[in-house]
Image (cartoon, rainbow, N blue to C red):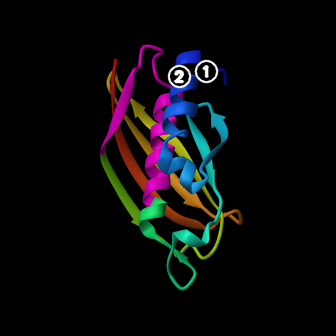
């Protein structure tokens, strides 16, 4: 999928280029027809207890994945956006592992997008599910 240059800038320089995304090492794995897949390498600094990655780190990955899917399919006049709602269900502990977040747009409206995000390990174990609503502004 080829992105409009403006959306490419928003995706790579603003969303994935944010300080939090960079500090977590989050990168674009691939753009899908209706979403994106992001990858986040394991970092010992994200552990909350024993070898378990902190839930806030996983929620941040979900938020950035949904925002990336929102931007990747947006109208080229998009100037920015914000997360207006996010629900996360933690399903298993992520233990010292890299993570992937596959974000699929469920509904894209005129100004809002609802995205389903699945966080998995490289082996395919489902760690968390999120539903995120993003609001755009032009």
Q: Disc 2 marks which residue?
A: 7
Residue pictured at 66% horizontal, 20% vertical? 2
Above/below status of 5 relative to 69: above
Which of the image's four quarters has the N terminus?
top right
User: Residue 23 appears at what percent x and percent y?
Assistant: 55, 54
User: Residue 21 appears at what percent x and percent y?
Assistant: 52, 48
Q: Is residue 125 visible?
A: yes
Above/below status of 84 relative to 14: below
Q: Is residue 81 left or right of residue 104?
A: left
User: Residue 40 appears at what percent x and percent y?
Assistant: 61, 56
Above/below status of 23 relative to 65: below
Q: Among all residues in the image, which is located at the extreme bottom?
A: 50
Q: Is residue 117 left or right of residue 51?
A: left
Disc 1 on helix, strand or loop? loop
Q: Among all residues in the image, which is located at the extreme right?
A: 123
Residue 119 figure quarter: bottom right
Residue pictured at 47% horizontal, 62% vertical? 57
Determine crowd level at label 2: few under 14, some 14-19, many 20+ residues with C-alpha closer than 10 A: many
For the record, the magenta segment spans: 59-84
Q: Is residue 78 left or right of residue 24?
A: left
Was residue 52 drawn as part of the magenta stretch in this picture?
A: no
Above/below status of 97 relative to 39: below
Determine crowd level at label 1: few under 14, some 14-19, many 20+ residues with C-alpha closer than 10 A: some
Proximity of marks 2 and 1: CB atoms separated by less than 8 Å: yes
Q: Among all residues in the image, which is located at the extreme left?
A: 84
Was residue 73 drawn as part of the magenta stretch in this picture?
A: yes
Q: CA distance from mark 2 to mark 1?
A: 6 Å
Disc 2 on helix, strand or loop? helix
Q: Disc 1 marks which residue?
A: 3
């Amino acid at each position: 999928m080829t992105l409009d240059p403006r959306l490419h800038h928003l995706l790579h320089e603003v969303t994935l280029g944010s300080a939090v995304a960079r500090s977590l090492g989050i990168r674009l794995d691939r753009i899908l027809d209706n979403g994106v897949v992001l990858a986040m390498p394991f970092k010992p600094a994200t552990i909350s207890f024993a070898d378990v990655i902190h839930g806030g780190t996983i929620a941040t990955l979900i938020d950035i994945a949904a925002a990336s899917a929102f931007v990747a399919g947006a109208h080229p006049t998009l100037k920015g956006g914000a997360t207006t709602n996010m629900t996360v269900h933690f399903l298993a502990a992520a233990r010292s592992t890299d993570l992937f977040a596959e974000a699929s747009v469920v509904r894209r409206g005129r100004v809002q997008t609802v995205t389903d995000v699945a966080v998995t390990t490289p082996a395919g174990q489902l760690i968390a599910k999120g539903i995120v609503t993003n609001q755009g502004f032009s």
